[in-house]
Amino acid sequence: MKVLASCFVNKISRLLTPFLHKQNTGEFKKAAAENLRKDYINSPASQQVDSFALYRIIGNDLIPRHAKGQSKSNLAFILENEPELPGCEKRFIVNRIVDRDEERSIIEMLESAGLYYIHIPFDCDEYRAARIDYEGVPTEYFPYTKKFSKLGEAEQKRVMMRLYRHKNNYVMNNNGARNSALRQGRSLAKWVLPWDGNCFVTAEAWEQIVSDVSLSPEYPYFLVPMARLEDNNLLFRKGFQPEAHEEPQLIFRSDSNEEFDPNFFYGRRPKVELFWRLGIAGPWERWKNEPWDLPRPSLSSDAGAYAQAGWVARLFSGQAHLENTSSGLVDRGVARNDAIGELIERLDLQVLQSSCEFKNNLFINGSFKLGEKSSFLPTSDLVNYLRRLSEEALARGPYSVTDKKTLPPSKDKHDYWHPAPYYWPNPIPIPGLPYLPRDGKRVPGTRLYEAMSDNYDRTRVQRLFDDTYTLTLAYNEFSEVRFLNHAASLVRRWFINPKTAMSPHLKYAQVRRGWNNNQGSSFGIVELKDFYFFLDAVGCLYSNGALDEKEMSCFQTWLECYLDWLVNSPQGRRERSSLNNHGTYYDLQIVAVAAFLGKTSLLKNTLLDSQCRIIQQFSPNGHQPEEMKRATTEHYCCFNLQGWIHLAELAERYGIDLWTIEGSDGRGLRKSMEWILSFLGKEWPYKQIDDFDKGRLLPIYHVYVDKYGELPFKVDHSVPSKECVKPFFFSHDGIRPFWQFT
């Protein structure tokens, strides 16, 4: 049989491939049909009696494309009204239905009718394992980019569908279920019909299908035109035969070669892909591929080996406005993408919420004792260091934005204010060019903790973050309420007391006067990057009673307003689209705030951005191209990787593994960490105009070993153990205080 099939394939390929667009030429079609007949006569299939196995695939209701409960009501209509189909065995596939009650009801209906079915269950763990198709979309069209923002809404949804292709393929499983039907059906009958669950066959339609197939059995494939119904009752009219112009269903002879490609996903040509391979004429021939579409396939060796048989009805979807309208195809496509997007969103949120408890702290646990939990550390040294830093913190603050010595352009002392650190006043007064960039060289007053920094808010907010966190750790270690009380006073003065509270925005962060109406830059958002550990401390203060319900509510209201500004302001949108460390730290800040507030949808969508950023930010050899453009490349490469480490720690808590994401060429966090760690004990060969603390590589090294094991190369340097690395780095370096604890 395989030899005969091979002969058939070779002949058809030789005859039809050069002439596919001339299929209507009578002489050519006649010659092709003659060759098909010869091959068919010599095949075992010619000895089989015509028998049919009709499978209908029942999947999830997709609202708003379908009405709720439509799959079940269509099945009920079929079971009650469809006639017996002579020579045909009816079977069904219950295909990954997410709603367990709906699935149970459908199975009960099938069993009550005594019908055979294949059950393909939905498994949450299998769905969770479905990865994002990062490489299916050009990086310039990732959801956080400027190019994506300029796409039309329908195009944006198609980009998202490509990114979610594997999730879509798992939960919808269109072509997977069709292939299951084909594989089983080929052993049951001469002809297999792997059809959609909403297909209905009248007695007259079936008679026509059987007649057409029986007259031309040499064709291994038949297309069955489909008629879209707005009223199922029309099927009861004797002799009813509507115009069937919709995307056809297919019939396969049991010895046919082709199956459906499971890579093509619901909503983006899963059946049409096979039409293309078979050279089936239709409007899909004119459809163009977008940059994020799967590549259009080559012609099959079976191209042209098809005929047409009868017709089939598609039962009413429950959404009349999406049926036979002039814009029906476009409207249905939009509704389809909306529906599958909403289903994936709902499933992702269920997975996310089942993976964590949003109220638990990440780095600080109320019962945590450094000495008890950290056997790898010399307890006395670390505890003494913590006590010294916490005593110093007690002597500072509480802080407020109202303490600064200069006013922002708004003249409102409640507005956070800081000039752009790398833009210097132009010594030559040139109109339109009041400032000149000097990358890596900070304007006086913009470096943390220096004397003139009191003019602005950057040093003050960093003290707020670091001191609150340190004091909370100290309370957990020493059980001295004075640490807890002072930490709470820091939060109250900066965020809660209306006389001293900061306005919930960063409009005046990194201002260049005379530019952008004297408002700040999107780059200023990075100045509040450390919310990720500060919020952990706030949660601990609340759980220990240092902040009461009313105070926590006020703080959350402030945070809600700030989050809205981060997401919707022009500065926030620009920062989201940043391709370098600013994009990384934007994600880190959004994820931390969203997690604290329980904003699961925003959290999930931001972590999608993060997964895409890994493919965009890193090269196959581990380089960070955007950071290598800077004047202090060693600093920025380490700084960006530290942001990724914190982001990966947060994402891991919510069931999303950033550590193992890799492109097909190996690019990812692991490769980038290996690249930068190859410089342990060595000189940095790239541009670095400032001094660099080589100790900053050590936290990266220890995180690498924890996550991946030993490096794949020997380090020509003695690497100290965790307990011998300082727990507190300069705050600009992006390393969390007491970073050893996770």
Image (cartoon, rainbow, N blue to C red):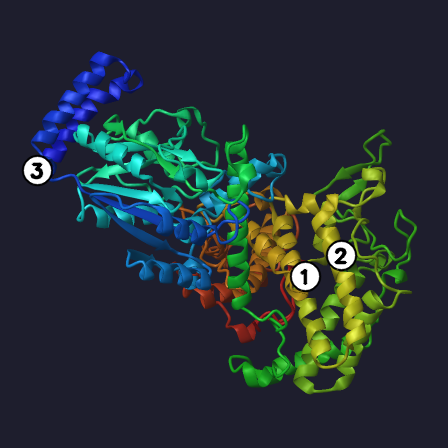
Classify 661 as above or below 203. below
**Residue 10 picture location, percent across and down:** 16, 28
**Residue 108 picture location, percent across and down:** 37, 63
Classify 253 as above or below 710. above
Q: Quadrant of the C terminus?
A: bottom right
- Give the number of the mark in front: 1 or 3: 3
Q: Which residue is mark 1?
A: 593
Residue type, label 1: Val
Asked if marks 2 and 1 touch (Cβ < 8 Å), the reply is yes
Classify 30 as above or below 195. above
Residue type, label 3: Gln
Nearer-N-terminus badge (2/3):
3
Q: Secondary structure at mark 1?
A: helix
Q: Secondary structure at mark 2?
A: helix
Q: Which residue is mark 3?
A: 47
Nearer-N-terminus badge (2/1):
2
Q: Quadrant of residue 204?
A: top left
Instruction: Tell which of 315 and 530 is nearer to you.
Output: 315
Nearer-N-terminus badge (1/3):
3
Question: In whole angstroms, how far apart are the C-alphas of marks 2 and 1?
Answer: 9 Å
Q: Is residue 404 left or right of residue 258?
A: right
Instruction: Tell which of 206 and 161 is nearer to you.
Output: 206
* Residue 140 in sight: no
Residue type, label 2: Tyr
Q: Is residue 632 left or right of residue 720?
A: right
Instruction: Tell which of 666 and 152 is nearer to you.
Output: 152
Q: Which residue is mark 2?
A: 562
Q: Quadrant of residue 28?
A: top left
Q: Is residue 239 left or right of residue 560?
A: left
Asked if marks 1 and 3 touch (Cβ < 8 Å), the reply is no
Question: In whole angstroms, how far apart are the C-alphas of marks 2 and 3?
Answer: 75 Å
- Say which residue appears at 75% left-offset and 51% top-offset: 565
